[in-house]
Image: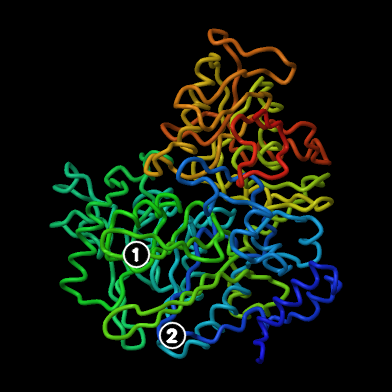
Amino acid sequence: MSLSRREFVRLMGMAGAAGLVPTAAIADRQPAETLYDRPMKGNVRLLHITDTHAQLLPIYFREPNVNLGYGYAFGKAPHVVGNQFLNHFGIAGNPYEEHAFTYLGYDEAAERYGKVGGFAHLKTLVDQLRAEAGEGNSLLLDGGDTWQGSGTSYKTRGMDMVKACNLLGVDVMTGHWEYTYLDHEVLKNVNAFNGEFVAQNVRVRDEALFDYNYADFDGFDEDSGHAFKPYVIKEVNGARIAVIGQAFPYTPIANPGRFIPDWTFGIRDDTMQELVDEVRENERPDAVVVISHNGMDVDLKMASVVSGIDAIFGGHTHDGMPAPTLVKNPGGQTLVTNAGSNGKFVGVMDFDIRNGKVQGFNYSLLPVFSNLLTPNAEMAQLIEDVRKPYSGWLNEELATADQLLYRRGNFNGTFDQVICDALNTHYDSQISLSPGFRWGTTVMEGQKITMDNVLDQTCITYPETYAREMSGTDIKNILEDVCDNLFNVDPYYQQGGDMVRVGGLDYVCDPKAPMGQRINEMTLDNGVKVEANKQYKVSGWATVGSQSPGPMIWDVVAGYLRDQKVAKVKKLNVPALKNAKGNPGLERYNGSVIS
């Protein structure tokens, strides 16, 4: 029996884990042509990227060691981390995959394997994967959160990423942070995008239909009220593929609705079912897929109640899943995937389509190791041109990292703590609050922290800071509300993201408790108990309802780092956890686990 090159490398990885082969030799024996050798197994190839957050250059990105799941989600993807993740997906022993998909040994492995992503490297890989499929036999799908997340996207209002996506060859996309520009800017970007922008769940408000400012926009449908095209039909290797868009359902709640006052969102699984039925009846597609920004847990529930979808290509929650989850529903079954974030992965779905339907599939999620891919020259030039006008701002060195600075994780990250400490220092506040965004890159220990790195963590279109008096009850209510968003037993009430980050405050969290009872025993860093009726000075940023009066968060953080010179995290404010022992979504927690 002969082994494929990939099987040989996997066996070498297993031998290395058993101590039979030096692990250094494994990396040396796995060239890019092996890692990225993906001859098509079928006749239609769908490539998927999502949540790149405007990261044009290669970056570091540490996966979480905390992604707790309870009830329906206990022990199931995506709520497994570290060793449990490797066992769940059966990928233990492959050093590339162990590093790409988990936090395990991150510092050493990142030094060894280098950065990930980068649009010039992504372009090389996408072109190779499309070439392997053959001319006209593939589509590139983008799940959104692409036009936001960097200094250049902020300065160009997302147009830098539109140009990069056009050159990359994105065929169809949907959105979330794309909607955090002003409505006319969103439509300007969509018009400049060469692909199709789809969103079945974004409608024009009834009261705005009669004097809608953008009635001439190509995607607007006055009869249905859709603000954007709900779906498109693509011909791929003789097969008709229906691609339906599902934008982030809670955009006007999680982000400023004042930027997009005429549009409504929502999960709308009822209209999704109606649309799938209509498309299957009228368009007679060979396959129906959804490009979604629901978040994986929401996608899993939607897949269980909506029939007729062959696959959901998901995003929003930044879960890099090496294999799809097969979900049964009244009409059959649906594949649910999620392709990570920051340009770190490319999903490859090969469909075997015969006799008018999908007969089989082959899926893999490929990590984009920048050191293994030659950057595409045209994309590299575009990136250089985009960054050049802002290079002095982006490249300013602010401080040195005295440890690994990261964000991703349910409760807090070391870079989040830097932001919280900066707020408390700037405002002389007792407590600081910072959003639990899942975007934000990693800075290695000893690395110079640049303004670019700070912007990777903070660059939004409502970056103003504030300081105000809040009662202990107010603070608890904020924490309870966000915690319910994270741990509600019904995925449809989860909005994605992680717990609000805190500075100067400790507390006990019981994710299994009911709403209003998850947060207890709040104390200040000095050990003094937070009292319900007492007032505290609280600082923060990214207010959704109205614009805050203070300076932009990146200026606050940059000023703090310039003064510090060495970025030290003296204390990581993470909660003590109840009902978390033995949870496969928790490893090497930085706080205490009570039960």
Which residue is found at the position 28% from the left and 71% from the top? 232
Q: Position of residue 158 (x, y in %)?
A: 48, 58
Is the residue under label 2 in contact with that under label 1 (CB below 8 Å)?
A: no
Which residue is found at the position 70% from the left and 76% from the top? 10
| Numbered label attached to residue 42 | 2
The outermost residue toward the top is 533
Which residue is found at the position 80% from the left and 62% from the top? 111
Which residue is found at the position 59% from the left and 59% from the top? 88
For label 1, the crowd category at 10 Å Cα-Cα, with few meaning under 14, some 14 to 19 and many 20 or more, is some
Q: Nearer the viewer, residue 99 or 84?
A: 84
| Numbered label attached to residue 62 | none
Q: Nearer the viewer, residue 129 or 466?
A: 129
At label 1, the amino acid type is Gln
Q: Position of residue 557 (x, y in %)?
A: 68, 38
Q: Nearer the viewer, residue 502 or 558?
A: 502
Q: What colour scheme governs how the chains and residues are painted in the rendered image of this protein?
A: rainbow
At label 2, the amino acid type is Gly
Is residue 377 toward the left or the right of residue 254 in the image? Answer: right
Residue picked out by circle 1? 333
Q: Position of residue 438 (x, y in %)?
A: 56, 48
